[in-house]
Image (spheres, grey):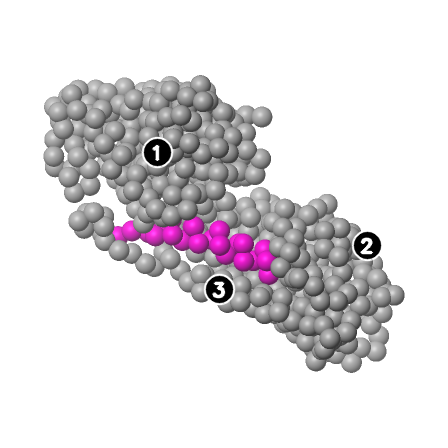
Amino acid sequence: MTAVLTPGATTLAPLERLWRDGGAARLDPAARPGVEAAAALVRRAAEGEAAVYGVNTGFGKLATVRIPAADTATLQRKLILSHAAGVGEPLEPETVRLMLALKLLSLGRGASGVRWEVVALLEAMLARDVLPVVPVQGSVGASGDLAPLAHMAASMIGEGEAEVAGERMPAAEALAKAGLSPVHLGPKEGLAIINGTQFSTACALAALFRGWEAARAAIVTGALSTDAIMGSTDPLTDAIHTLRGHPGQIEVARAQAALMAGSAIRESHREGDARVQDPYCIRCQPQVTGAALDLLRAAARTLEVEANAVTDNPLVLPDEGRIVSGGNFHAEYVGFAADQIALALAEIGAIAQRRVALMVDPALSFDLPPFLTPEPGLNSGLMIAEVTSAALMSENKHLANPCSTDSTPTSANQEDHVSMAAHGARRLWRMVGNLEAILGIEALAAAQGVEFRAPLVTSPALAGVLERLRARVPALRGDRYMAPDIAAAAGLVREGVLTEGLALPELGS
């Protein structure tokens, strides 16, 4: 299936489908006249006498150097090769695919000055699964994501490396294997491709999509934990949350109340329970997880705007007949959004970890066995799984420190304030992986706890969650090699298995 992208009006939903499921993407054909009009203006500028940045001049601090018309194509090729200076592990293919789609959207606004031939190659690469190998380190998030996007551009001119259907090879071979030819860059085209925030934005969106699914899973594992420790559902009373008014808080409370409806465990202790209030990690789930949902949605709104933005430089304005320099490549918006996502991920994990700690502690778990094992002492149960969750929680706290407040001058002080958006967005991938593992451990602990309440049973909705969990991870009767259990449970979170078929908040709602 081919996603049709409308520049300036594409929502996150088709971008998420492209990221999750792969497939082709192309621009709405209505974008072509605007793209070609901008390219014609660039062509005239390249043939003229006036100095136009990036068209017939050098770049950055070298903008005062004039480039003869005969060398403008060479200038673009050299720009790509010199800027393909990234290091580190390669970006995961699904996020590379998203990055290519975002570049399509930006070029499709008709303000970058590239020929339709460049657009067509990007579309063909997506359609034929030719994905550049893009190192993840090297961008400071201003003057665009120069190094990562240069690696993308290099593959388009037959340099560097690319993958075809998962097989890594020289880019020229990859293009040929897919029946494609490298593009010969015209004036400004190399600059238009590498100036922009598409690497940072793609990384932030990928983490947002994964992080939202983890947040939904946290609503489920939190409800299961509440039943495991025989917690109260009174704090989920709708009036409490509507009196405050925050949408995320209201949604989480309603979702958890629905999840726990019909639980025999809950009904068993409505009367005669000496406990007056549960700890905050149980009682304040809507207030914390709900706040995280609202923060993630705020970041999503920013990133949706950025996904449709023109972020290269200079910008081509055909209606005004001008090519003007500006600073749309500065990724401060993306950096702020990445920091918001980081805070949300860290806090969802922090309160979930406290629920794990509650369940393994016999002084707090309301008569569950120590460390949720039937023979404590002989067995250690989930003792060290809880320690692992604490380690991951602490790591995420450190990673949640803001990146957007950092800056370092580059390019001989021409680029003297930068956003660090690439660094901020990329660290989210590690954070969301940590969160998935924390929630996986919570699911394991909560399942054990609920099963120890037999013959009392949990609600029908949560019983279905338990069934899906136990299909992959059997109950812990005695100590065994734990790492595969945790990996499997984290996988269930990542794949959306724990939330399957449940009425939970949606990112776009």
- Mark-to-mark CA distance, 3 and 2: 35 Å
Residue at the disc numbered 2: 460
The answer to whether residue 82 is above or below residue 301 is above
The answer to whether residue 418 is above or below residue 397 is above
Furthest residue in direction right, as rendered: 455
- Residue 167 shows up from this direction: yes
Image quadrant containing the C terminus: top right
| Residue type (three-letter) at the residue carrying disc 3 | Glu
| Residue type (three-letter) at the residue carrying disc 1 | Gly
Residue at the disc numbered 1: 160
Residue at (58, 46) in percent of width and height: 507
Question: Is 281 included in the stretch rendered in magenta?
Answer: no
Q: Position of residue 178 (x, y in %)?
A: 46, 22
Question: In which quarter of the view is residue 244 placed?
Answer: bottom right
Q: Residues within 10 Å of mark 3 (few under 14, many from 20)?
A: some
Nearer the observer: mark 2 or 1; the answer is 1
SS assignment at label 3: helix
